[in-house]
Amino acid sequence: MKARAAVTDGQGNFSIEEIEVSHPQAGEVLVEVKAAGICHTDWDSLSWGNPLVLGHEGAGVVQAVGDGVAHVQPGDRVLLNWAISCGHCFQCMAGNHSLCETNSPVTKTRPWAGHAHPEGTHFNGKPIERSFNIGTMSTLTLVRGEAVIPIEVDISFASACIVGCGVMTGYGSVVNAARVQAGSSVAVIGVGGVGLNVIQGARIAGAEKIIAIARKAPRLETARRFGATHTIQVNPDDSDLSQAAAQVKEMTEGRGADYAFECTAVPALGAAPLAMVRHGGMALQLSGIEQDVTIDMRLFEWDKIYINVLYGKCTPTIDFPRIFRLYAKGDLLLDEMVTQTYPLEELGRAFDDMHKGVNSQGVLLLDK
């Protein structure tokens, strides 16, 4: 079957191309993708060195299922996810399903390992991998059955697709990794898509003080709509956020926040949350910083915990239905996060807008 897809050569370039997608084999599902989120990771994947079908956030409709797939059937609305766990490796047995030693596309050497059968997708007559196993910037995707979760609430595909990474990372890091306590104080550095979902997660968890930190005033206004109780606009000369950290301490009785989350993807700010938490507090880095960073070890004094969280410690079969229920109740805002949609052919403009910080969350609509 023919499909339109965003394809990268792995050397920094991409184009919209026609690809061929096979019918599902045993254990596989063919999905017509209706919407795909746009993330900084998608931009990074342009330079991973191998040709790929782009995209790792997506939602759509099941077109066909292979033998052995019973939890979905053709016509079902589904959310795609890349946290496929084997259930029996060391990490899965420890409850760390997003760190699966067998299937995780992040903990494996190749960030697209664990895909459906390698002959399932072709470009120019040759097999091509799908980013993070799912390659959602494609009108059709062939994935393993574990990569699809039924959508059982009334929600648009545009709002649903962002749950697959940005929402899960922000919300999950609050409730699964930090386990933010009611009545606590939370500082959030960076209020893009992930940061806004940290704010929402903290609000839902009952945090008393939620401090949003950003450089642009409009971003802080948005943060208040999502649940921030206090805001700090960063001064242009505050490159390491030391001034912002001092303000956080002033807002928290001089001791620092109970939790601080870094959501900027700026390597120089990797240590910033440590400066904002109290003794015994927890600092969490959510943006996937992988560069070398120099850290003043005194920032760890005393008894502070620093965690680099992957995917909000996601267990898709538990977390995604929970997120959708919170949305249905009106507790978790998703429609409001999608500030711009684009047809697949305008992916370049969508990337430009992402880098400019135009959107809280941009989404591709693949049936446009």
Image (cartoon, rainbow, N blue to C red):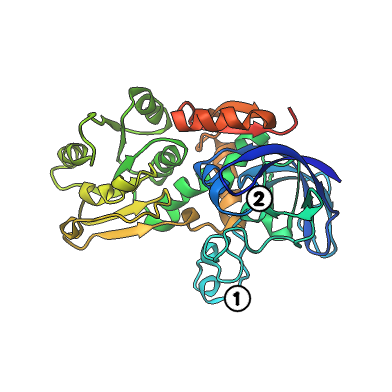
Q: Give how far across and how far down residue 241 sits, in percent.
A: 23, 40
Quarter residue 249 falls in:
top left
Q: Is residue 218 left or right of residue 122?
A: left
Looking at the rendered image, the disc whose residue lies closer to the viewer, 2 or 1, is 2
Q: Amino acid at mark 1?
A: His
Q: Nearer the viewer, residue 191 or 240?
A: 240
Quick check: 29 above or below 152? below
State yes or no: discs 2 and 1 in contact (Cβ < 8 Å): no
Q: Which mark is residue 88?
A: 1
Residue at mark 2 = 52
Identify the residue at horizontal 49%, vertical 73% (top origin): 94
Q: Secondary structure at mark 1?
A: loop
Quick check: 279 above or below 354? below
Q: Secondary structure at mark 2?
A: strand
Quarter residue 292 falls in:
bottom left
Q: Earlier in the sequence, mark 2 or mark 1?
A: 2
Q: Amino acid at mark 2?
A: Leu
Residue 89 visible? The answer is yes
Q: Give how far across and how far down residue 3 sits, in percent.
A: 80, 41
Q: Give how far across and how far down residue 216 sits, in percent.
A: 34, 26
Q: Which mark is residue 257?
A: none
- In the rendered image, the residue lying farthest to the left is 254
Quick check: 250 above or below 64? above
Q: Give how far across and how far down residue 9 sits, in percent.
A: 64, 47
Q: Nearer the viewer, residue 261 or 211?
A: 261
- In the rendered image, the residue lying farthest to the front is 11
Q: Is residue 11 left or right of residue 210?
A: right
Q: Nearer the viewer, residue 162 or 237?
A: 237
Identify the residue at horizontal 67%, vertical 48% (top origin): 135
